């Protein structure tokens, strides 16, 4: 799809509600300006990893398509706080926003979105290195309906940020905290305030200990997916906590958890989590083949990665 192609169908599809232009490299600001002028009813747009889209195109889109509910902007390096502030000014009904790998925005742009778009239910900030705890706290105070938040490898985010997030967004069911500076205090807050949590990534959150994970498993019993890869302080007792507290668990990542995974611990895990479908044991060389076989016998549908 090119700019001329977008212009051609926009002229005859003025009632367009949803459009995917993902990875259409020829699509740029001119295409967004056309959409803004011709398709005022647009509600969902995916322009992830397209051409040279900048704040100019985003501002035009926001002004011309105020009914936008869902916007995918993955992979843009030229969209800055100015573009996000334009969205915040015009698209207050926005519910889903994907900024994965958009390196230019800072806390200021995301804070503007959070304060204006209070109906947000999903926000992806992965690899947004300039976005940190200030943005998370803005989400906590302004977006009570938030259900999905991705902040893996974003800017600095700590226990206090997650504590406020848990209190302000009790509907959270998916949270990606990979590589964040969080520990047991964050898990305690999630356990206390987010009972609907189903998917949680704590990958390489090296401050997490057995005590925090035990509290999490007691409070978030609906967990179906848990990523503990690289959590180096965890020991075998955490597998007992998971076994007792997470009976619905289907996906579990224990890669590079050398102190956590033992043959005995895996058997304990399998007894309590019979619905496991995926178990990642990469770089856990201490696990024996017999223990893995026993897990597969107890959890009939499990796929084990080693």
Image (tube, grey):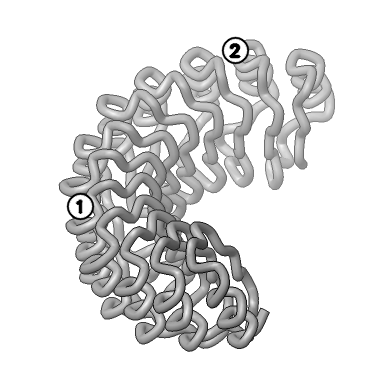
Q: Is residue 92 above or below residue 197?
A: below
- Mark linked to residue 272: 2
Residue positioned 63% across, 43% down in the render: 255
| Residue 196: quadrant of the picture | top left
- Mark linked to residue 223: none
Q: Is residue 176 left or right of residue 121?
A: right
Q: Is residue 170 left or right of residue 306?
A: left
Residue positioned 51% across, 22% down in the render: 242
Q: Is residue 1 left or right of residue 306?
A: left
**Residue 61 or residue 293, whichever sits in front:** 61
Distance of label 1 from label 2 (alpha carbons): 36 Å
Of marks 1 and 2, which one's residue comes earlier in the chain?
Answer: 1
**Residue 269 or residue 276, whichever sits in front:** 276
| Residue 270: quadrant of the picture | top right
Q: Position of residue 156 (x, y in %)?
A: 30, 62
* Quadrant into which the N terminus falls: bottom right
Please name the residue that numbered disc 1 is placed on: 137
Q: Position of residue 47 (x, y in %)?
A: 53, 70
Residue 267 seen in render: yes
Q: Is residue 290 above or below residue 186?
A: above
Residue 104 seen in render: no
Q: Is residue 39 above or below residue 192?
A: below
* Quadrant into which the C terminus falls: top right
Q: Position of residue 299 (x, y in %)?
A: 74, 18
Residue positioned 56% across, 63% down in the render: 19
**Residue 33 or residue 151, whichever sits in front:** 33
| Residue 219: quadrant of the picture | top left
As helix, strand or loop, the secondary structure at mark 1 comes to helix
**Residue 247 or residue 122, whichever sits in front:** 122
- How crowded is the residue under tag 2: few (<14 C-alpha within 10 Å), some, or many (20+)? many
């Amino acid at each position: 799809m090119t700019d001329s192609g977008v212009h051609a169908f926009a002229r005859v599809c003025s009632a367009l509600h949803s459009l995917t232009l993902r990875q259409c490299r020829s699509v740029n600001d001119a295409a967004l300006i056309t959409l803004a002028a011709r398709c005022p009813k647009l509600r969902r747009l995916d322009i992830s990893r397209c051409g040279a889209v900048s704040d100019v195109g985003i501002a035009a889109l926001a002004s011309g398509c105020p009914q936008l509910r869902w916007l995918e902007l993955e992979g843009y390096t030229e969209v800055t706080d100015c573009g996000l502030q334009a969205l915040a000014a015009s698209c207050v009904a926005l519910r889903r926003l994907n900024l994965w790998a958009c390196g230019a925005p800072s806390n200021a742009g995301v804070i503007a979105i959070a304060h204006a778009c209070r109906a947000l239910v999903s926000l992806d900030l992965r690899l947004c290195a300039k976005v940190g705890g200030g943005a998370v706290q803005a989400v906590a105070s302004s977006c009570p309906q938030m259900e999905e938040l991705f902040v893996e490898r974003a800017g600095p985010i700590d226990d206090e940020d997650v504590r406020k997030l848990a209190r302000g967004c009790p509907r959270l069911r998916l949270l990606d905290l990979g590589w964040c500076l969080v520990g047991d205090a964050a898990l305690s807050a999630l356990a206390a305030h987010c009972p609907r949590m189903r998917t949680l990534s704590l990958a390489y959150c090296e401050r997490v200990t057995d005590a925090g994970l035990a509290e999490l498993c007691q409070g978030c019993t609906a967990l179906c997916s848990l990523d503990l890869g690289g959590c180096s302080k965890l020991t075998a007792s955490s597998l007992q906590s998971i076994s007792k507290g997470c009976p619905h668990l289907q996906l579990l990542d224990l890669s590079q958890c050398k102190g956590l995974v033992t043959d005995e611990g895996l058997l304990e895990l399998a007894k309590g989590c019979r619905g496991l479908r995926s178990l990642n044991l990469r770089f856990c060389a201490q696990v024996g083949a017999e223990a893995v076989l026993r897990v597969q016998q107890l959890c009939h549908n499990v796929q084990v990665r080693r």
